[in-house]
Each structure stands twice: as structure tokens, then as C-alpha cells.
Image (tube, helix red, strand yellow):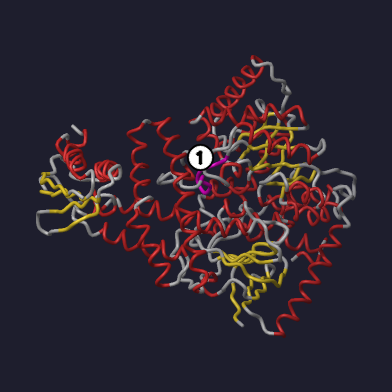
Amino acid sequence: MEIKKGIGVSPGVVISTAVVLDAEDLRVPKRLVAAEQVPVELDRLGEAIGAAVVELTTLRDSVAARHGKEIASIFDVHMGMLKDKYVFQQIMQAIKEQQTTAEYAVSVVMRRQSAVFANMKDAYLAERVKDIHDIEKRILHHLIGKKREDLTKLTNDVVVIAHDLLPSQTAALDRTHVKGFACDVGGRTSHTAIVARAMAIPAVVGLGNITEEVNTGDTIIIDGSRGVVIINPDEESMAEHREFERKHERLEIELRTLRDEPAQTLDGQIISLQANIEFPPEIDDALEQGAQGIGLYRTEFLYLSKETDPTEDEHYAAYADALKRLRGRPLVIRTLDLGADKYREGAESGERNPFLGDRSIRMCLHDIPMFKRQLRAILRASTLGDLRIMFPMISTLIELRQARMVLKDVEEELEDEGITFRKDTPVGMMVEVPSAALMATQFAKEVSFFSIGTNDLIQYTLAVDRTNEKVAGLYCAAHPAVLMLIRDVIRAGARGGISVSVCGEMAGEPLYTLLLLGLGLSTFSMNGPDVPEVKKIIRSTTMQHAREVARRVMSFDSERQVMHYLREETRKIIPEAF
Amino acid sequence: MATASRDILVQNAMGLHARPAMQFVDLANSFASTIIVRRLAEPPAEADGKSVMQMIILEAGQGTPLRIEADGDDADSAVAKLAELFETRFGEE
């Protein structure tokens, strides 16, 4: 038995069997196979190379069409390397002689090959090492991709152990059988954490080297509430954790009874609680948890789960599916928010300062055809339900107007083509850059709603990268400067007669419910599993009390005071919350 | 079975870098003959003319003397066509 301490990012306890995912850019662990497995590994190798050739052909053709044959010719070289019989023979030989998995043989042979290249005197040729890494990754992607596909059709419950889950991996998970996550790296706001909370399964991240210590098939306890993972536990801790597991389930059941109750304060103020999603199927869970609509649909996951950009019809299908599941409830579609910490596979920007770079709406305005493809699909779907459009990362009025102009263009195109859409589809914006928050009064005249994205607003206001462990301690929603911006945006929205919601992590943290309520927030959008607890707080207080709490909080000058006070006040309402 | 060979000099400025090597290998693969390319300068080396990895590792910069050897029914035309690639500097300026 071994106990490992990490960061609990999604509460709950689970005892299950481990599946270890090998990370693509890490050394592939040496795994031996039985002699009778060797032909299977050879077949897998052949299939993976075949699939890589097909993929590369598509890529080359699309690059040639967009940028010309000269640029695309680099892929001819990759193709030649992929089809190189000398390399292929070496890999086959490694599988046969050392009886290893195909992925290990590929990685050994390619690393040997790149060492030879790196030692060449000609600097230009030595640079070709990068091409070898590239094709190594491409083959491995298909070999390990096979394993990933296995995660889409599991027959038993498992917990997933990975270095760090990639968006493309979580997109492919079989959500009915994956019961927990444990990762080497990550923090509270990492992708794994967000997905785990949305799925309401326990997750622990920041465990260091758990992928090296666990083998597929080991029994694992993941305690997401306390941030602990136990590898091959003894009887005693099994019994102890089974008890936790039961307790957690009981609390869940209790909160679920709140599902059909309104989110209404004791003095009658009705609040709208909505959910954030990444994939339309999550809507069913969110409604089950009591959400009254979707306040944030992160459409970038359409882009992250595959190598080619989605077509207009793929966009449309996703939006139509979402609206169908919502049966008339609102759906706020955030347009593409890629860049900074979210990239399409193999498309990292190489920018020195990606969070201040070409991301989100800026990227869309630099690639109008791509932007238009999404907007066309959104407008086409607008007749199917209560759909609203939201632009992310707006930092100046000009940007907002440009985005609206593109939308106008798309509307005219659709009209010309005789395609129907809702002409009064509401258009709103994220307020997540301090400049937008400070100018909220002006922005309120040009949009129909605001949604405050607290995660980015905090990091841009406090100049803190929340994923950098050395400074993450400075990242805090309770910082008075952040709270002042939030207060002013809510006020500006109210004066301008438009609705304001918060869709960052803050909206789902019970600690901030009283404060946001008191500041006048009427819509909260959060991860589905957070809805019952926030609802419980709203149903246990009055607006008068919430306003007093907010007034008091705004008089403090440090985040410590704010958090301490809010903890005290919230504990009075639900003692078991902290 | 016929054999043929010809000695050539690498003339293009960048030498036998990735793209020319690929052109060579693509052409070599269109022949039935086995193709061997020997580096005649120090350090001596030889490569399978149908493997781009091996051809790149020859590290044949501008001015390197090479020998193209073919063994098979189409050996003569293989050597002639492959040598022509070097003479036309792989279509580079």
C-alpha cells in the first residue's frame, strides 16, 4: 500500500481499478509482451503507420491548397520517413527480438535515429531531428490512440491515471465507466479539474509521478475531498474509504432533493442558476442537477477533440443537439475561445506571452472564414430554441464592433441564400479583461448581456498566472480589486438595463454565493454539480442579509479578511460546507 | 542481371538535404533494381538509395563525391536518371 498526497480538485471518494494512460510526449514505458502477442504488435505497427500515412496525406493536401506546394513539400519528407523500409525493418526487429509493445519499439528506434541525426555536422541536416520527433509522435498518436479508443467503450468501472489529461483525451472518454482521475500535474483550474467537476467524479492532481507508480489493473482509492490517492490499499483503508464513499453518496442524495425546488431567497428574490458545459451530452446531467439553462457553452472543444477544424455542419449539429436537450431553456454559446492555454493539437503558437497574445476573439478576427463558419452555424440553429451568442475576451469597443460587423455580414449572406434565422438573437460579451470591466457602462449600451469570466478577470487584474505554482498563491477571487470590478460591472449592467451573470469558477463556490447575491447578481453559471449547494445557500438567506454581507465585504482591504468573514457567514447557513 | 554505376559530385548549394534526398528516393523507388549510394569522401559510408533516412545520414554536402550503383534489370536507366537529378541540381537555382 502506498499513500500519495496531491491537490483534491473534485470532491468524493472512489475505489476502483486503474487504467494508466501513457503521455505522448513522455518516454514510452518499456512494456514486454508474451511471445504469442508479437504478431499482434506487428499488426498494430502496420496499422498505425498506415493510418499516419493517410492522415499525413490529408494534411499535406490541405496545406498545399492553402499555402502552396513549396511549404507542403516538408510533408513529402515526413511521408518518405514514415514509409522508409529501413526504419520499418528496425522497428519490426525490435518488436520481435525484444518482445516489446509496438509503441516502445517505435520510440526506441526513432530515438536512436534522432541521435544519429543530431550528431551530424551539417547544422541544417541536424535540424531534421525535429521531423523525426514529429513522425514519432504521429505514429505513437495512432498506437496510443488505439488505447484511447478503448476508453470510449469500457465494460467495467475504472479510474484514469495520466500525466495530464488532454482535452482530446477527455473528449473521447466513456463517461459512464470512468469514475475518477489522478494526474501527475495540474491545479484547481486545470482542464482535468474542470472536466472532473462537470462529471461529478473525484479527482486529485499534482501527484508528481503517479503514472510511474501505478500499473493498469492496480486497485486505487481516489479521495478527491482530501486530495489523497492510495495505491493497492490494505483492508483497513478499504473499509474506511467505503464508509466515506457511502457518506458522500448520502450528501449527494440530500442535495438532489433540492433539484426541483426554485433558487429563491427567503424574502422571495428568484435567482437563475445555470450550468457551464463543454459537450452537449453534459446538458442532461446539468438539468438533473437542477440547472435552468446553459450559461456558458465552451465551443472550443469542437476544435480540440480532433486535428481538422469542424465544418459548419458539425458546428450546427452540436448546437442543434444542445438546443434539443434543453427543450426551450436558454443556451449561451460562447464563440471560439482558443489560444493561451488551449490549442488545437499540434498548433501551439510559440508566442512569448500567449495569455496576452493572439487568442480568443482576436484569433477569430484574424481568421474571418473560420469565425464566419461558426457564426453561420449558430444563426442557422437560432430558430431551434432560446439561443444567445457571446463573444469572449473583448478588450475594446472596436473589437466588439468588428465582431458584430462579421455577424452582420453572416446575417446578410444567410438572407441572400434564403436561410431562416432569428434576427433578434441576443448578443452578449464576456467581461474578463479589466479594460472591459472599467468601461462596462459604455459596453452596456452595445450588448444585451454581460457574463463575467472571473478566472481570466482575476489573472489579468492581479497579473498572476494561476498555473504557475510559484505565484498561484497570489491568485484569489477575494482580492478587493477584483471585487470592486465585479461590483461595478453588475452595477453598470443594472443601470444599462441588461442582465449580468458570472460564469467563472467563483459562481460555483459556495464561499462567494452570499457576496455575489448581495452585489445584485441575478444569474450564476457554474459546473452542474455545484448547483445544489449554491441553491441551498440562496434558499437559506434573505436579500437583505446578503446585501449587508456585501457591504461589509467591500469595506475590507485584504483578501484574508474577506475570506475569513465569508467563511464565518456561510458556515452559519450550512455548517457542513467547510 | 545487370549492374551499372556512375560517380557524381553533389552540386547544389545546400547539399543532399531533406527535399533532394526525398526526390532521389522517390525516383529510386520507381526502379526494380537495388540502389546503393556510396560516399567516396572521408568518412566513407553507404546508403540504401531507397531509404530517405539513410540518404540523409550520408551527409553529402556541396562538393561531396558519390557513387550511384544499381543492380537489376533496369540498372542502366536507373543510374542514368538518378545521376541526372544531381546534374540538374534537383531543379534548384
Q: Which of B68 and A50 is in front in this view?
A: B68
Mark 1 neighbour class, 10 Å CA radius: few under 14, some 14 to 19, many 20 or more: many
Element class at badge 1: loop
**Can you tell which quarter of the image residue A231 is in?**
bottom right
Q: Is residue A111 above or below residue A375?
A: below
Image coords of residue A206 (percent x, y) = 55, 66
The kind of secondary structure the magenta stretch mainly shows is loop
Q: Is residue A433 above or below residue B43?
A: above
Per the rendered image, the range of residues in magenta is A337-344
- Provide the residue designation for mark 1: A359
Image mark 1: chain:
A
**Identity of the residue drawn at 73% across and 40% down:** A322
Q: Can residue B86 be seen in this view?
A: yes
Is A475 placed left or right of A287 in the picture? left
Q: Which of A466 and A361 is in front in this view?
A: A361
In what quadrant of the picture does the N terminus of chain A appear? bottom right
Image coords of residue A302 (percent x, y) = 61, 42
Identify the amino acid type marked 1. Arg
Is A213 placed left or right of A508 in the picture? left
Furthest toward the top, the residue is A416
**Identity of the residue drawn at 75% across and 29% down:** A497
Image coords of residue A127 (percent x, y) = 28, 51
Q: Can residue A564 be seen in this view?
A: no
